[in-house]
Image (cartoon, grey):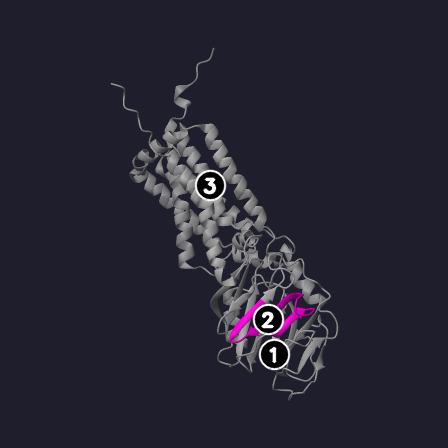
């Protein structure tokens, strides 16, 4: 009978470190891939752009770089604690493994609309792992002994109770993830709707002002792209490959420059403006495509992303309704999207499974955009998860994000765009408070009963 090799057995501390490593790997995946809402509708159409971004250091930001360094320091520390090798060999092995993991995560992020992969993240993660290795070899192992003792107490607790608690928690987490999937998809858009400038098809949501141009792209644009376009061409986007509609109101012939959308025709009581003065809308007349804007709808649905760029000025800062500036809709209550004005505020509605056919619950509101009455260049970019507004090439603080929070709470409450961040904080609390309470109970040292005298 063979006797087990005692030297090959792992000590209790080594077993705990191995488990901690696996748990922390799950934490990294959760942090880097949340909100787990992949989209594959037209991934290959935008794949080259996203891969180019992945293989470059474009858009490197100090805060993001430091956060990525910090994220991988514990992983490097734990992995180095498991290896009984010299500093050089451990450093090489752990850094290579950490960077391979990081690159895999970045590759997965190519398919996540809410994420943008970058080689800078891989470099930062590798640096973080290296710092964790150095901390471990500088005496860090002795610092974790008290913590490992607490974990041993937890391991000695009732395993059945642990399995029930954690099983219930992760079942709830799984249901929350399922609830948020697809909440930002645009697949429900109707390709029979017409495109209108200055009103609804019913003629009861008039807008008064001036429009110089409107462009539609079938992809989201980065902050650098939008800022550069405003500096170089006053906001006109150069995206030849992704441009699916462009109206520049420089003459009395309202043709789509791309050739995909129908010609615009006057409705109501038209008053023709001088050819070089842009499109002047007085509230009594508006423009509508002579047929459905199916190419625009299908192009946006295919990518599940869009960018709308417009240069315009409101004639009156007290218009309400909201007053329709640009809308792809079929009346006041059925729309794909609507760019509108409500007093001095910009209002944007779009149809998703979360917001409904009217795109109203919630709607995106940016206060004070039309307060001055001056000509503004507006860009709205949607990446499948988040809608961001840029005014004159500058990103506004107001954004509208379809994440797990509104998807979950929208079943119970009337959503308000101003409270979306609050919903997000509540959801984060619900996700992390239960395991914190369970861990604090399990890690609490047991009190020994006093013996009977």
Q: Spot the residue most to the top.
A: 1
Q: Which residue is mark 1?
A: 207
Dot 3 lies on which element? helix
Q: If you read the primary sequence from the N terminus, does the residue marked by circle 3 or circle 2 appear first?
A: 3
Q: Is residue 328 covered in magenta?
A: yes
Dot 2 lies on which element? strand
Residue at 44 percent across and 40 percent down: it is 435
Mark 2 surroundings: few (<14), some (14-19) or many (≥20) residues within 10 A: many
Q: Toward the viewer: 21 or 136?
A: 21
Numbered mark located on residue 328 in the image = none
Give the residues in magenta: 323-348
* Residue 96 is at least partly visible in this image: no
Q: If you read the primary sequence from the N terminus, does the residue marked by circle 2 or circle 1 appear first?
A: 1
Front label number (2 vs 1): 1
The answer for how far apart the CA atoms under marks 3 and 2 are is 43 Å
Q: Spot the residue most to the front.
A: 453
Front label number (1 vs 3): 1
Front label number (3 vs 2): 2
The spot of residue 252 in percent (x, y) is 68, 84
The spot of residue 117 in percent (x, y) is 52, 54
Q: If you read the primary sequence from the N terminus, does the residue marked by circle 1 or circle 3 appear first?
A: 3
Dot 1 lies on which element? loop
Mark 1 surroundings: few (<14), some (14-19) or many (≥20) residues within 10 A: many
The spot of residue 216 in percent (x, y) is 62, 69
Q: Toward the viewer: 47 or 190?
A: 190
Q: Which residue is mark 2?
A: 339
Q: Spot the residue most to the right.
A: 291
Residue at 51 percent across and 47 percent down: it is 105
Q: Which residue is mark 3?
A: 25
The spot of residue 288 in percent (x, y) is 70, 76
């Amino acid at each position: 009978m063979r006797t087990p090799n005692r030297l090959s057995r792992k000590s209790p501390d080594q077993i705990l470190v191995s488990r901690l490593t696996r748990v922390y790997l799950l934490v990294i995946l959760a942090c880097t891939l949340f909100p787990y809402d992949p989209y594959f509708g037209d991934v290959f159409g935008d794949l080259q752009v996203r891969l180019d971004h992945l293989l470059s250091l474009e858009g490197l930001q100090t805060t993001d770089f430091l956060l990525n360094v910090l994220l991988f320091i514990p992983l490097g520390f734990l992995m180095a604690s498991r290896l009984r090798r010299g500093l050089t060999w451990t450093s090489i092995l752990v850094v290579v493994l950490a960077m391979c993991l990081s690159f895999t995560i970045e590759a997965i992020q190519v398919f996540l609309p809410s994420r943008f992969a970058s080689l800078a993240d891989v470099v930062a993660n590798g640096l973080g792992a290296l710092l964790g290795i150095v901390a471990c070899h500088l005496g860090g192992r002795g610092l974790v002994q008290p913590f490992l003792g607490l974990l041993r107490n937890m391991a000695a607790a009732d395993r059945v109770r642990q399995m029930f608690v954690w099983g219930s928690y992760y079942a709830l987490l799984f249901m929350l993830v399922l609830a948020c999937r697809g909440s930002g998809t645009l697949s429900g858009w109707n390709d029979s709707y017409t495109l209108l400038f200055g009103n609804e098809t019913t003629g009861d949501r008039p807008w008064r002002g001036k429009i110089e141009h409107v462009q539609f792209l079938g992809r989201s644009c980065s902050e650098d792209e939008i800022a550069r376009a405003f500096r170089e061409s006053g906001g006109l986007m150069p995206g030849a490959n992704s441009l699916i509609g462009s109206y520049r109101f420089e003459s009395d012939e309202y043709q789509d420059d791309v050739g995909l959308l129908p010609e615009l025709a006057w409705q109501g009581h038209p008053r023709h403006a001088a050819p070089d003065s842009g499109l002047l809308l007085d509230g009594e007349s508006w423009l509508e495509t002579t047929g459905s804007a199916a190419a625009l709808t299908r192009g946006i649905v295919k990518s599940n992303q869009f960018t709308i760029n417009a240069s315009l000025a409101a004639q009156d800062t007290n218009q309400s309704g909201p007053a329709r500036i640009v809308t792809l809709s079929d009346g006041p209550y059925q729309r794909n999207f609507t760019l509108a004005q409500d007093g001095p505020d910009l209002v944007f509605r779009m149809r998703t499974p979360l917001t409904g056919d009217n795109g109203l619950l919630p709607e995106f509101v940016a206060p004070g955009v039309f307060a001055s009455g001056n000509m503004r260049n507006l860009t709205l970019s949607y990446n499948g998860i988040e809608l961001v507004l840029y005014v004159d090439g500058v990103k506004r603080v107001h954004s509208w994000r379809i994440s797990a929070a509104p998807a979950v709470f929208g079943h119970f409450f009337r959503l308000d765009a101003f409270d979306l961040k609050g919903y997000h904080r509540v959801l984060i609390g619900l996700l992390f408070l239960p395991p914190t309470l369970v861990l604090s109970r399990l890690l609490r040292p047991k009190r020994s009963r006093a013996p009977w005298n």
